[in-house]
């Protein structure tokens, strides 16, 4: 019984020591065996590992691809148009021994702080060598590749491999937004004014062409009308001259009758004139019956004027007009009878 009292505790201590000496490495991680902060062994393959209890310790690091968001930073491209860039990086720990030597007990948080400094510096360097249009264009994948390649060498000293760098957002600083919007608004207003000016110019040109066409058409129409009118007048004068030359005396008599008809048009027409006027040529005594009628007409007109000497001029005119109208009517009847 005395031996059992010693064996059981010894077995328990051995079991605990064996458990403390064994550790398991997962396939998603790598492990370091440290003794007094000195690296004794590196375990990168999954499986069982051994260490000296209470003297050695195991430090584990994630072996998967990790993500790190970079705080937004301001960059100044070549055109001095400041931009705020928000980026992130994908990385993994490829050399745990170097990683431990570089960061010490700080671990992944300290390594990410160092990685942020590297990425921010390289991002400013690369984006500061191009214009803002290149950064905002769809071809910025080449810029992100340049940032990654520039940071690879420095990150390798930390035992880290940078897998990828991406720009999530690229915005203008808040204090520059109003000025940028005002400039964009002014540019759009200038473009609109240019379009309006070009439209007005085109409208004025079309309007001037239409006015010119109108003037040309009206002028040509007037010219054609004047030509036609001149030809008609020439033809009319030719016919008139031919008719006058055929029988000048009859033509003159016919024209006088037309003049009488036009002068005494209507039922209340009156004419007051001298009896020896050329208008009454065909009422003279040497014109046959017309002359007799003309003589009596002259006498009647004289009597009417004498009678109306004491009356108003209007009454004399009406009496004379009535006598002349009767004389002209009888003259026209006699001419038609002949």
Image (cartoon, rainbow, N blue to C red):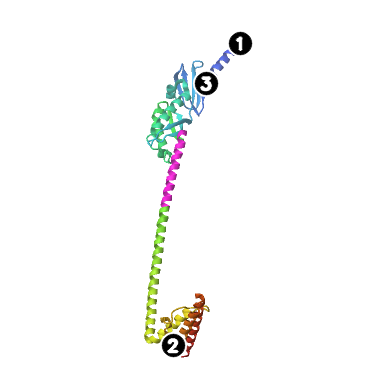
Q: Examine the residues drawn in magenta and state their main secondary structure.
A: helix
Q: Is tag 3's residue or tag 2's residue first in the polypeptide sequence?
A: 3
Instruction: Answer above or below: position of 135 versus 268.
Output: above
- Left or right: 328 with respect to 245? right
Task: Measure the alpha-carbon separation of dots 1 and 2.
Answer: 190 Å
x and y percentages locating residue 175 in the rendered image: 46, 33
Task: Measure the alpha-carbon separation of dots 3 and 2.
Answer: 167 Å
> Mark 2 sits on what residue?
291
Q: Nearer the viewer, mark 3 or mark 1?
A: 3
Nearer the observer, 57 or 81: 81
- Give the residue drawn at x 44%, y 88%: 291
- The dot on residue 22 is 3
**Count of numbered marks:** 3
- The dot on residue 125 is none
Question: Dot 1: within a 10 Å radius of its alpha carbon, few (fewer than 14), some, or many (20 or more) residues?
Answer: few
Q: Quadrant of the N terminus?
A: top right
Q: Nearer the viewer, mark 1 or mark 2?
A: 2
């Amino acid at each position: 019984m005395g031996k059992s009292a010693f064996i059981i505790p010894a077995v328990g201590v051995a079991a605990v020591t064996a458990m403390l000496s064994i550790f398991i490495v997962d396939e998603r991680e790598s492990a370091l065996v440290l003794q007094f902060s000195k690296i004794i062994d590196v375990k990168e393959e999954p499986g069982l590992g051994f260490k000296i209890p209470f003297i050695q310790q195991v430090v584990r690091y994630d072996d998967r691809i990790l993500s790190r968001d970079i705080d937004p930073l301001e960059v100044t491209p070549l055109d001095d148009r400041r931009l705020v860039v928000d980026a992130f990086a994908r990385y993994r720990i490829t050399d745990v021994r170097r990683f431990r030597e570089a960061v010490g007990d700080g671990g992944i948080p300290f390594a990410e702080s160092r990685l942020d400094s590297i990425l921010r510096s390289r991002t400013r360097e690369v984006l500061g060598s191009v214009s803002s249009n290149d950064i905002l264009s769809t071809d910025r994948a080449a810029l992100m590749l340049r940032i990654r390649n520039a940071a690879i060498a420095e990150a390798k000293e930390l035992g880290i491999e940078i897998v990828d760098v991406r720009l999530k957002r690229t915005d203008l600083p808040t204090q520059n937004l109003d000025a940028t919007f005002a400039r964009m608004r002014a540019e759009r207003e200038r473009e609109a004014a240019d379009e309006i000016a070009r439209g007005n110019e085109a409208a004025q040109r079309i309007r001037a062409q239409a006015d010119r066409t109108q003037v040309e058409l009206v002028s040509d129409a007037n010219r054609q009308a004047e030509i036609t009118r001149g030809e008609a007048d020439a033809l009319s004068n030719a016919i008139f001259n031919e008719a006058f030359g055929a029988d000048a005396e009859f033509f003159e008599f016919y024209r006088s009758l037309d003049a009488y008809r036009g002068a005494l048009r209507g039922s209340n027409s009156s004419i007051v004139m001298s009896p020896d006027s050329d208008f009454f040529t065909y009422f003279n005594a040497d014109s046959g019956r017309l002359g007799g009628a003309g003589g009596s007409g002259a006498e009647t007109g004289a009597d009417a004027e004498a009678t109306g000497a004491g009356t108003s001029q209007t009454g004399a005119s009406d009496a004379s007009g009535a006598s002349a109208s009767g004389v002209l009517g009888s003259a026209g009847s006699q001419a038609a009878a002949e």
